[in-house]
Amino acid sequence: MSASLAATPLRDRLAVWCGWVLVGAAAIIPLLGWLWPREFWLAPALVGLLCLPAVRLRDQDRPVAIVLFAGLIWAAVSTMWSPYHPPKLDNSTILKLALQLPLYGSAILAARRADPVLNRRALQVLAWGCALFGVVFLAEAATQGAVYKALRVVYGPMRDDLAESRIGHATYLLGAIWPLAAYGAARKVRPWLTLAMFAGTGAAAVVFGSDAPVLGLVLAPAVALIVWRWPSGGPKLLAVLAAVLFLSMPLVVWAVRHFFDYQAIQNALPLTDSMRLGYWSHAIDWIRARPFLGWGLDASRMFGPGIKLHPHNNPLQVWMELGVVGAVLAAAFWVVVLSGLSRAKPSLAMAATAACAATYLLFGVNFGVWQEWWLGLGAVVAMLAVMNAPAAEPERSSL
């Protein structure tokens, strides 16, 4: 790498540096996803830290940046009335968010700044790595997690049930990024790489009880087809649906509880899903008690035993902690991002990006919105979207 930098003009060195950082990130993303899924945030954080000199906002970046910054400010203000006070500095969600916003933003902008040749190399490395990830998932599904369990004996023994849960968790990671990884592979006409990602995710998700990734394998191709068929209107429709999801989720849960036998639905579901429905029911009661300002950042930690840590639902947690202001900002974010995928002509890159975004939104009804690995996964999806975007006019270096 040093030889490449030495032979490159000064104005291009940053592009080469960002390119090599992306190649390294592409190599570790599948490994982190398999062995350390809860530390997945390390990938975008390291890219962002190493590529901070690449930060340069364009006019089209400003709407998203404004919405995110406004959300960060509102979250910080809400800590004034939150009943939760972190016992240690590393438990402070607002501090983590304040660091994640510039670091993850830097990672996304680095993908745009990277040297095109190295960017393509990074996409190839990612495609092969994710395909191998899928093959490993097939082996894990066939052996009930024998490979992962054997490795855990070496670097950290873990009970079999927890190991299997961790493998199931990992299916969400590959399940969210495979359309963009597959698009990078498809441009080299290697369909078997895509098949390995798809089949591995599905097999492991079924065996280890991860329902959402199985649904995601159906949703992603459907959304991609819609955006490919209607490149202008498809992303806008998706943007409207995302906004409706965030704005109406409390009403949806209330309607199900009011018009149907909510307890019977809970009893008919597997334990983990039944527990989530219980959290959601308690969450809408707390939302109704304070709908405008919310209860403050991380307040849902204090509403046990009805809610354990958080409602396990992104929209409900935003409503519960940040109120209608937070919900509107979240909806605005998705409207700006998804409507920005509209194109006059069909684009496979935009279709793959929309598929990943839709899958991420689907998975969001399972997890806490502030979890580091979850926000890191969103940053990786955005980073891959930029890496896969069709080449635009070359950017002039600010050096």
Image (cartoon, grey):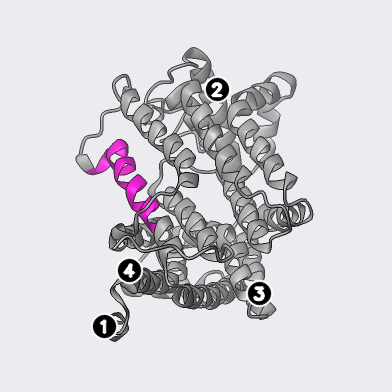
Query: What residue is shown with label 2?
Result: 284
Tell me residue 166's x, y (percent). 47, 59
Q: Which of marks 4 and 3 is nearer the N terminus?
A: 4
Q: Pointers 2 and 3 in contact (CB under 8 A)?
A: no
Tell me residue 394's x, y (percent). 48, 65
The span picked out in magenta is 90-107
Q: Which of marks 3 and 1 is nearer the N terminus?
A: 1
Mark 2 Cα within 10 Å, few/some/many (few <14, many 20+)? many
Residue type at the position of mark 2: Ile
Q: Which of marks 3 and 1 is in front?
A: 1
Location of residue 118 by image quarter: bottom left
Tell me residue 347's x, y (percent). 69, 60
Residue furthest to the right: 229
Write the residue at 54% across / 75% down.
136
Residue type at the position of mark 3: Ala
Q: Pointers 3 and 1 in contact (CB under 8 A)?
A: no
